[in-house]
Amino acid sequence: MPDKRYLHLNLVANDINLHQGAYKYEQAQAIPERSTFERLIEYGTFGDEGLFTALFVGDIPGLNGSPAFDGGPAEPITALTAIAQHTRHVGLIATASTTFYDPYNLARLLASLDQASDGRAGYNAVTSVIDQFALNYSLTGHLDREARYDRADEFLQVLRALWNNRSLRRDADGLTRFYADPINHRGNLFQVEGALNIAPSRQGRPLIAQAGGSGAGVRVAAKHAEMVFTNSSTRDSAAEYRANLDKALMEQGRTPGSVPAIPGLIPYVARTATEADERLRELDSYVNWEPIAPFALGQFGIEVAFDDINEAFPTAQLPVPADVEKTIKSTFGNYVGLYNWIHERPGVTVREVVAQAVGRGGATHRKFVGSYDDLVDDFAAWHGDGNVGGFNLMFAAGAQSIREFIDEVVPRLIDRGIYRSTPHEKPLRERFGR
Ligand SMILES: Cc1cc2nc3c(=O)[nH]c(=O)nc-3n(C[C@H](O)[C@H](O)[C@H](O)COP(=O)(O)O)c2cc1C
């Protein structure tokens, strides 16, 4: 039985969601520089220490600009295979694009991570958004959203069939042997004979997670996912997402509530709310906002002209979400999040929008600024609503802020009775769901 009473906290474990001022902040604090890979292993070991359900590693399948702001972290499956050797309990969820991968190859890679981690592997299926990345994968242009999700659906059917058609059986002579059957998949996009030649782990196959919140994304999640990564920034929007997902789950003959929705969250916490706010302002002070503005807004499919970054954002130029859901190049949920955020703040400056968009880490994921106790109260309130399974935590200032969270917030959550106090022993797939 899953641990229903407890919040799931996943740790987003690479640098792609850092605050853009994080490296300068570390330098100012005299924190020694580490290689990108040393930083990954550091995140990994925090995974067990913080009793996190899983490490969650996002992926950007191409370069967004040189010099890269994030140090160029290793590809997620490779990173997590290394981290698996430094951890015992934490789950290991790797993101990979169904648009750019081949399903047989990816089935092998993830099954290998599952073996290397003794049943702690998970796969976060995304379809990817940045047009120019398609050119890295022998495509002439990016597929539109419907086509991407059609491909994701067939891709996940193939993955699951390959993974499910395998078993380890103890034969009469006392030896355990690996058996696998062909899948003979003949689809619109993929022709895959099988069988897969990698043995299952103790959880049978990796957990399937999904991130992508448009209507088409929710339909694919309802069909295949066991966990979804969302970007609900209010308790009301989490309730709305829960209702949407439950409706889609029922259409697939699945039980409502059986797939936990886990929104992203970026905590800026300290002893007091004032200190937390000062920390955020300090991080902001290390960023040169002007040059990153076009890229930051472009990620949301927003192209607006402005003369001065300190002027009010030209809100009237933003299209209404419903008008662009089919055509927008970016993650639709991110666009909606940013659109609402701007509209709730009349007079907000371009600089503030850029900071919210990417500068302060994690796209439009909710940013929480407050004391340790405030954050525990916030978690308890969301947990009490019953619409989320927990949070995917992104620590904008990197290792120092994770350390502080583990030392200060985790014990308070345990005291509140909403977070487990012992490490997970079960395989990853048995930790989620109802
Ligand atoms: C919470 C969240 C996290 C995501 N993480 C990634 C990622 O790490 N890499 C990636 O290529 N796409 C990522 N995506 C975008 C997905 O590629 C998604 O399929 C894309 O947003 C298009 O679909 P949508 O409009 O349904 O969201 C993420 C999307 C969401 C909502």
Image (tube, rainbow, N blue to C red):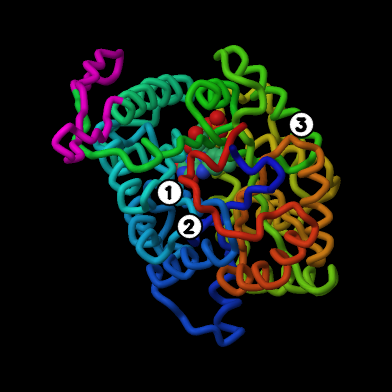
The answer to the question of whether label 2 and label 1 lie on touching residues, with beta carbons closer than 8 A, is: yes
* Precedes in sequence: disc 1 or disc 3: 1
Residue at image coords 66%, 22%: 256
Query: x%, y% of residue 204?
Result: 37, 36
Relative to residue 203, is residue 262 drawn left or right? right
Task: In the displayed orientation, state which residue is furthest to the left.
Answer: 173
The residue wearing badge 3 is 239
Magenta region includes residue 7: no
The C terminus, quarter of image: top right
Distance in Å between CA atoms under marks 1 and 3: 29 Å
Going by the numbered disc 2, the residue's amino acid type is His
Name the secondary structure under disc 3: helix
Quarter assignment of residue 37: bottom left
Under circle 2, the secondary element is: loop
Residue at 70% x, 57% y: name it.
351
Q: Can residue 327 be seen in this view?
A: no
* Residue that badge 1 annotates: 120
Q: What stretch is highlighted in magenta?
A: 165-193
Residue type pointed to by label 1: Arg
Residue carrying label 2: 89
What's the residue type where badge 3 is placed? Ala
Question: Badge 1 local density, few (<14 within 10 Å), some, or many (20+)?
Answer: many
Q: Distance between the residues labelled 3 and 2?
A: 31 Å
